[in-house]
């Protein structure tokens, strides 16, 4: 499972286990996603399902949900696309300005600048926050906002108020520590026998996406082992170290994998590769290892769940001093951080990146991120030579995860965060309601010239013959899937009853407000126009005759 999906599933599982709220509402993009999630979470937590604490809806249900419910907070599983859209809808419809939080994952895709630009508008309040999972991610998001403000300041006018932007604070990800444990000597030997890994070797493990364009380049690791082999006289009685690589592999990666195998043999390494292992095999691979190695060099990485899992298994970690990894590994205590060197400014590549596939631009940037091979070789050698140090660092790593990186602890931090955001002052409530977003298309204005005319408030409408059959129970309306929350059969019947006799659109809108507590003018107009479209309502001319009456004369 990809890191983002693993992290989101872990957070949700821990939140429901803590169960701090009266109810949990999920708004999905489409009915199929809604139904799939309802089944998954319902099976996972039948107790909450049976007590009616879980509710699954589509995004079209959001307006009604925001009007009816006093939400404590909305938490979004990614920080790029939806925070500003949800904030505008909240400002417009909700009784309270509840906190909106959203979490970072990868931040390096070129299209993300457009998403972050959406955040910068006056409707963003002090209760809106991007939760960055690492110190490096906090800095990256703040730099996004600073750069966008510089580029989009209106003519540099000092009199113009700066657009709002969400606050950014760090809350790490976590793991379920109970799912991982340091291996006993017997378990380690059994795992090695199962996986055909040399029993007496020092086993170094790289676990994650096996991709030089989206995770890490493994060649510096092999170069480091080459240095170790060249600097040391091999002991014929001792088996060579073993490098294990495991994780997700890309389609068509066989040639690259064969090249790695040949390279490893050339530097005196035993080498094992386990593509796309399942959870049981993953546990066996972790039990077989002595040292976890992750010289990540790719900007897509922001945290490092695999490092936490390795530490929870009691493994010392040799990782690059890069992004979120430096929040996890304590150099010299739980492992070693290998220095890295980057390129600084890259103006030509910056301009080229939006024109390229993401994996191409990420590869070009990763190949400019230097993981210090001599230092990497030195740290690998220290751990290869000192089993006692490996055990001490492994114990320290396990303790660090237990203290700082459990999902239960992360949920407590979120609860404190949401409660703190409620104490933040907000701008004038009515002013917020009236704020449109400059990057939201005003469809009525932009496309107003497409129809022949718009429906005027003074226009008269009445139930058609088909409409009369519907409200008398002799026919039924046909409502397409995907209109949940907008059109409901009972509301349609009541609308048609209200229009038994000719009535102006303005008067019908007022009457419809009594049918549904969520009804507003826009929703009422939608339903009137839908009924006209389906020939359940019809226009009445000023002389009082409907269109069908005129045709009959």
Image (cartoon, rainbow, N blue to C red):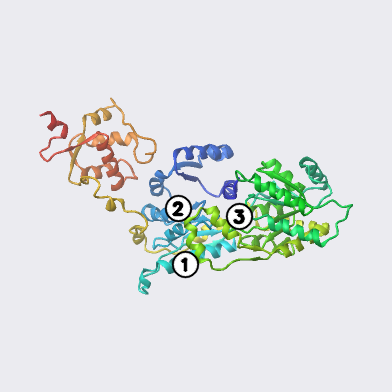
Q: Which residue is mark 1?
A: 147
Mark carried by residue 173: 3
Taking depth in this image into account, of 527 and 503 the one nearest to the observer is 527
User: Which residue of the protein is positioned furthest toward the right in this rendering?
Assistant: 237
Q: Horizontally, is 75 left or right of 281 in the view?
A: left
The image position of residue 509, as x and y in percent, is 25, 44
Residue at mark 2 to residue at mark 1: CA–CA distance:
20 Å
Q: Quadrant of the N terminus?
A: top right
Badge 2: how crowded within 10 Å, few (<14), some, or many (20+)?
some
The image position of residue 233, as x and y in percent, is 86, 59
Which label sits in the foreground, 1 or 3? 1
Q: Quadrant of the C terminus?
A: top left
Asked if 345 appears above or below 508 in the picture, the reply is below
Q: Please, what secondary structure does the residue beneath circle 1 have?
A: helix
Can you see residue 377? yes
Taking depth in this image into account, of 92 and 119 the one nearest to the observer is 119
Taking depth in this image into account, of 68 and 233 the one nearest to the observer is 233
Q: Which residue is mark 2?
A: 82
Q: Horizontally, is 429 left or right of 11 in the view?
A: left
The image position of residue 103, as x and y in percent, is 53, 55
Label pair 3/2, CB-CB below 8 angstroms:
no
Q: Please, what secondary structure does the residue beneath circle 2 have?
A: loop
Residue at mark 1 to residue at mark 3: CA–CA distance:
27 Å
- Where residue 40 sits, quadrant-wise, is top right
The residue positioned 76% from the left and 58% from the top of the image is 226
Asked if 551 appears above or below 504 in the picture, the reply is above
Between disc 2 and disc 1, whose residue precedes?
A: 2
Q: Horizontally, is 362 left or right of 57 in the view?
A: right
The image position of residue 129, as x and y in percent, is 49, 60
The residue positioned 28% from the left and 53% from the top of the image is 446
């Amino acid at each position: 499972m990809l890191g983002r999906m693993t992290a989101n599933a872990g957070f949700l599982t821990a939140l429901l286990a803590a169960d701090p709220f009266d109810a949990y509402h999920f708004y999905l993009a489409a009915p199929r996603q809604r139904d799939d999630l309802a089944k998954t979470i319902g099976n996972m937590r039948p107790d909450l399902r049976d007590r009616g604490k879980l509710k699954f809806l589509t995004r079209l249900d959001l307006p009604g949900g925001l009007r009816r419910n006093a939400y404590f907070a909305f938490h979004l599983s990614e920080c790029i696309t939806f925070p500003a859209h949800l904030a505008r809808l909240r400002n417009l419809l909700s009784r309270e300005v509840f906190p909106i939080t959203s979490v970072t994952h990868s931040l390096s895709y070129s299209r993300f600048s457009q998403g972050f630009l959406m955040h910068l508008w006056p409707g963003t309040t002090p209760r809106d926050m991007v939760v960055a999972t690492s110190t490096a991610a906090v800095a990256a998001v703040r730099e996004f906002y600073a750069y966008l403000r510089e580029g989009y300041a209106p003519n540099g006018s000092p009199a113009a108020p700066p657009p709002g932007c969400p606050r950014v604070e760090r809350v790490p990800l976590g793991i379920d520590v109970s799912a991982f444990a340091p291996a006993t000597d017997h378990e380690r030997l059994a795992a090695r026998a199962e996986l055909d890994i040399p029993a007496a070797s020092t086993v170094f493990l790289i676990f994650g996406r096996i991709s030089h364009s989206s995770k890490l380049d493994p060649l510096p690791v092999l170069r480091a082992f080459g240095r170790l082999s060249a600097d040391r006289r091999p002991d014929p009685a001792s088996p060579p170290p073993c490098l294990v690589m495991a994780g997700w592999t890309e389609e068509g990666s066989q040639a690259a994998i064969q090249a790695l195998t040949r390279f490893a043999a050339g530097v005196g390494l035993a080498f094992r590769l386990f593509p796309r292992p399942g959870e049981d095999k993953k546990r066996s691979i972790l039990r077989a290892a002595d040292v976890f190695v992750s010289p990540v060099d790719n900007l897509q990485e922001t945290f490092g769940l695999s490092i936490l899992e390795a530490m929870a298994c009691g493994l010392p970690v040799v990782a690059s001093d890069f992004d979120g990894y430096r929040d996890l590994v304590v150099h010299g205590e739980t492992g070693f951080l290998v220095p890295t060197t980057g390129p600084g400014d890259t103006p030509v590549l910056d301009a080229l990146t939006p024109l390229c596939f993401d994996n191409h631009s990420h590869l070009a940037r990763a190949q400019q991120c230097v993981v210090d091979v001599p230092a990497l070789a030195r740290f690998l050698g220290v751990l290869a030579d000192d089993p006692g140090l490996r055990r001490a660092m492994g114990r320290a790593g396990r303790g660090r995860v237990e203290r700082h990186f459990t999902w239960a602890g992360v949920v407590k931090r979120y609860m404190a965060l949401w409660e703190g955001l409620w104490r933040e002052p907000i701008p004038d409530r009515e002013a917020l309601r009236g704020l449109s977003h400059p990057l939201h298309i005003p469809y009525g204005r932009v496309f107003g010239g497409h129809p022949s005319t718009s429906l005027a408030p003074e226009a008269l409408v009445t139930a058609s013959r088909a409409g009369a059959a519907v409200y008398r129970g002799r026919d039924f309306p046909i409502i397409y899937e995907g209109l949940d929350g907008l059109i409901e059969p009972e509301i349609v019947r009541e609308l048609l009853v209200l229009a038994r006799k000719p009535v102006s659109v303005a008067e019908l809108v007022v009457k419809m407000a009594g049918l549904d507590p969520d009804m507003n003018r826009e929703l009422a107009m939608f339903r009137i126009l839908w009924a006209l479209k389906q020939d359940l309502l019809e226009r009445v001319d000023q002389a009082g005759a409907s269109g069908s009456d005129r045709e009959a004369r």
